[in-house]
Image (cartoon, coloured by chain):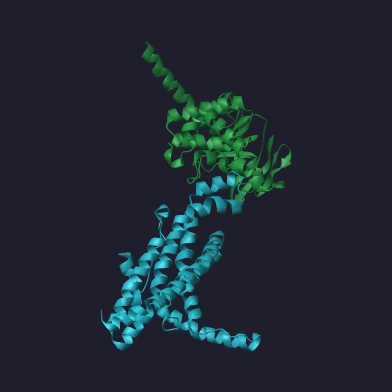
Amino acid sequence: MSEALRDQLALLPTYLAAHLQLTLLALLLGTTLSIPLGIWASRRPRAGRVALGAASVLQTIPSLALLAMMVPALAALGRATQASLGVTVPSIGFLPALIGLTLYSILPILQNTVIGIAGVDPAVVEAARAVGMTDRQRLRRVELPLALPVIVAGVRTAAVWVVGLATLSTPVGAPSLGNYIFSGLQTSRWCSTRSCTRSSTGCARAAAVSSSPRRWSSRRCTFTPRRRSPPASWATHRARS
Amino acid sequence: MIVLEQLTKRYGDAVVVDRLSLEVARGELLVLLGGSGSGKTTTLKMINRLVEPSAGRVLIDGADVTAVEPAALRRRIGYAFQQVGLFPHMTVAENVGITPALLGWEAARVAARVDTLLELVELDPATFRDRRPAELSGGQQQRVGVARALAAEPAVLLLDEPFGALDPLTRDRLQQSIISIRTKIGVTIVFVTHDMVEALLLGDRIAVLRDGRLVQLGTPAELLRRPADPYVAQLMETPLRHGRIVDALAGSQQD
């Protein structure tokens, strides 16, 4: 093993931990935002279309641009809070990366929550009303359990995306496996890029597998991701193949 | 027992149910008979507020149904319909016991009630209790649907073509079980169907609906002998003609 490679591998635990921390936190935030939003959206079809439209627009922003935009946005927010409350908001590092990735995870989870609830057999919904369930009981006992496989499929899609996209948080100042890619590109030393590809493939695979226990087999997966390819998307592609 | 007063339902300009008034006596089985678009299902759903009327009102035992929360009202009224709508993620026992569970019955009482009802609809409790709806035939699902509707000992049972889409033999057996269930428990039933023979066999009285209006209300014999208008006469003609044909065939066989 060359010394260069050994140096790079020594950084792996740090980068991997940061990458996973960012990914898991973004997914957790995305899920806690999107599932209630999806439930709300499926109760109010018109507002639901607006919410889904907004999430789709977010998704059309190239991921690198979305993360980059967080920096000036947070800087402006930081100036405003400094002036009014005397509190600063960090505009580079973990926070812009976390917000960008969270926003990116919303669409698949939101959309699958809406689709999952809408996909429940109307006869079953009518029966739930007829046996005397309140709206909340119907949601908790019937609609959510039946929509669960579709919602889980959405979380899975989001997980695979976010694991790949988290590499793009390096340019906004949050360390991740992307550090290998960007340092490799800058120095034309390809061993670092290779280490990234390998480790993030493993990482994406872990995410895909861990989020899909067999009993939640997503037999009704309806969401087909439409995605552009950011530089590090090899990882997710390989993980899915 | 059940009183409909000038009950009306409009969707935009379309009048689906038009100033319908009728009374159902305690323990009676009233059939709402009509073709598709006659407003029979909408009328039925206004009784348990799955559909809210545009005008008029429904009284059960003298009390307006809008006086209680819809969920509380529906726990007192059994409802079974053609699509059945069994909860696919629950067992047969959980499906049948859902309304008692919502009413807060003790688990042991629910379990005992489930077994009684499965026996009533002629499904062996030990065999079927823990099955999922997907493991049942169409006829068995319909039976579970009827059992679920009866679970919380309702005084009123609403049935919307509960035996539709079944083969004739299964249908006949389920119709017989409705008749036997009626003799065992004195429940008031409103039964929606478009099947004239089913209406004649099951109904104490039949209300014929057309375009949301009540055309005739009477016993099966009255409808057969004195149809109020050509539409009712035409409806009654079909089962009579079928009966004559079958009689003639059976007669010629014996010769």
Q: Is residue B192 visible?
A: no
Q: Colour of chain A?
A: cyan
Q: Is residue A66 left or right of B113 when viewed as pictured?
A: left
- The one nearer the camera, B130 or B62, is B130
In the rendered image of the structure, the colour used to display chain B is green
Report the number of discs: 0
Residue A13 x %, y %: 39, 75
A212 displayed left or right of B145:
left
Horizontal side of A45 relative to B8 (left or right) equals: left
Instruction: Indicate the quadrant where residue A86 lies.
Output: bottom right
Residue A72 visible? yes
Toward the right, the furthest residue is B62
A161 over B117 or under it: above or below: below
Find residue B218 and report its horizontal and vertical position in percent: 62, 29
| Residue toward you, B96 or B230 | B96
Residue B199 position (above or below residue A37): above
* Image position of B162 (left or right of B249): right
Q: Nearer the viewer, residue A130 or B207?
A: A130
The quarter holding residue B155 reads: top right
In the rendered image, residue B24, in percent from the top left (x then y), is placed at 66, 33
Q: Quadrant of the N terminus of chain B?
A: top right
Query: In the rendering, at what x and y percent does residue A34 appear?
Result: 51, 66
Q: Measuring 34% from the left and 68% from the top, which residue is drawn there? A: A202
* Quadrant where the image shows the C terminus of chain B: top left
